[in-house]
Image: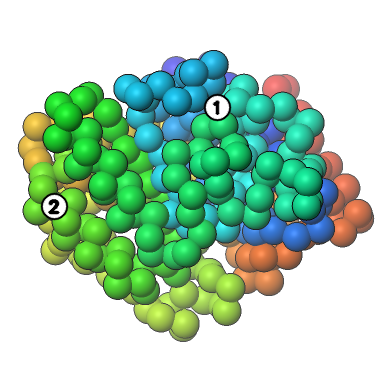
Amino acid sequence: MNSAEKKELQLTAIKIREGILTSVHGAKAGHPGGSLSAADMFTYLYFKEMRIDPKNPKDPNRDRFVLSKGHTAPGVYSALAYRGYFPVEDLPTLRHSDSYLQGHPNMNTVPGIDMSTGSLGQGLSTAAGMAKGAKYLNKDINVYSVLGDGELAEGQIWEATMFAAHYKLDNLCIIVDINGLQIDGRTKDVMNTEPVDAKFEAFGCDVVKIDGHDFDQIEAAMEKFHKNHGTGKPTAIIMKTTKGKGVSYMEDKAGWHGKAPNDEEYAQGMAELAEARKKLEA
């Protein structure tokens, strides 16, 4: 991509990170760490990759997205809001009793959400089902799903991957956010799932390993996904990320898996993101 396009994506990612902080601060609860680690991928998917229309969120021919690690809903909500699915001003109502923005994605209340998720391990199965349905109907529809690395300990993930390979779902893009942390600490200590790349290869996927904060690498991985159409192989993008990316005191800290910033922390995080924007625009 050219420098202007990359800069635009980087600036959009900053807005999405601001939306994440604003929503969890407004809720006084939520999951900022894993939302921030996947923010660059959410940006690329919603602002460049997926064939979607905020004015027609139920278009039957749209690409589909399933957030398998459903607790990171603040990241997807922020992307949807800035993409035009609902007002950005609604983000601070996250988790409020009268809000349509629940703590986990709800396809019945939030425009742009294709699947209600939250029980870890189940999202990839539904994404694989969507991809199989598109194949059955002979529809040109791509399905994307973002997983957490801690989620890989769920056996259903591997059943879904085996299903995807068996039914040659080359329209399925599996994206694994390897930030190395989950609620109880380091993923390698809680349940070591490495080598993740070799596992997905063994289950029949074409694997691409990238830096999940590098838009050039994200784009190259998506190009590989499109090249795999017709091969019968699902694509697994294994992206190395930093939990809490963009907010210094949250970065690589398991404690920020499911905790909201207080007023002072919120102000500091927003100031850091504003400074990052200033540097990009200079």
Report x, y in % for residue 225: 24, 36
- Horizontal and vertical percent position of residue 33: 63, 58
**Distance of mark 2 from mark 1, alpha carbons?**
32 Å
Q: Where the C terminus falls, by quadrant?
A: top right
Q: Amino acid at mark 1?
A: Leu
Query: Most extreme residue toward the right, as rendered?
Result: 264
* Viewer-nearest residue: 157 or 13: 157
214 and 201: which one is in front?
Answer: 201
Give whichever of discs 2 and 1 has the lower sequence position: 1
Can residue 253 be seen in the rendering of this structure?
no
Is 217 rendered above or below residue 83?
Answer: below
Looking at the image, which is closer to me, 272 or 227?
A: 227
Q: Is there a contact, CB below 8 Å, between mark 2 and mark 1?
A: no
Q: Secondary structure at mark 2?
A: helix
* Residue type marked 2: Ala
- Would you name the residue on which mark 2 appears? 165
**Image quarter in which the N terminus is found:** top left
Return the residue at label 1: 9
Give the answer, above or below, for where 136 lies relative to 58: below
- Quick check: 8 above or below 249? above
The structure residue drawn at horizontal position 30% and vertical position 72%, both measured from the top left corner, is 155
Q: How many marks?
A: 2
Image location of residue 210, percent across then percent down? 36, 47
Q: In the drawing, what numbered circle is on residue 129?
A: none
- On the image, the x and y values in percent for residue 57 come to 49, 24
Residue occupying the point 55% across, 46% down: 106
Residue lying at 78% horizontally and 46% vertically, measured from the top left? 98
Q: Residue at x 40, y 21 (%)?
A: 59
- Please tell me which residue lies in front, 27 or 175: 27
Q: Is residue 117 left or right of residue 175?
A: right
Viewer-nearest of discs 2 and 1? 2
Query: With respect to residue 61, does 260 lie above or below?
Result: below
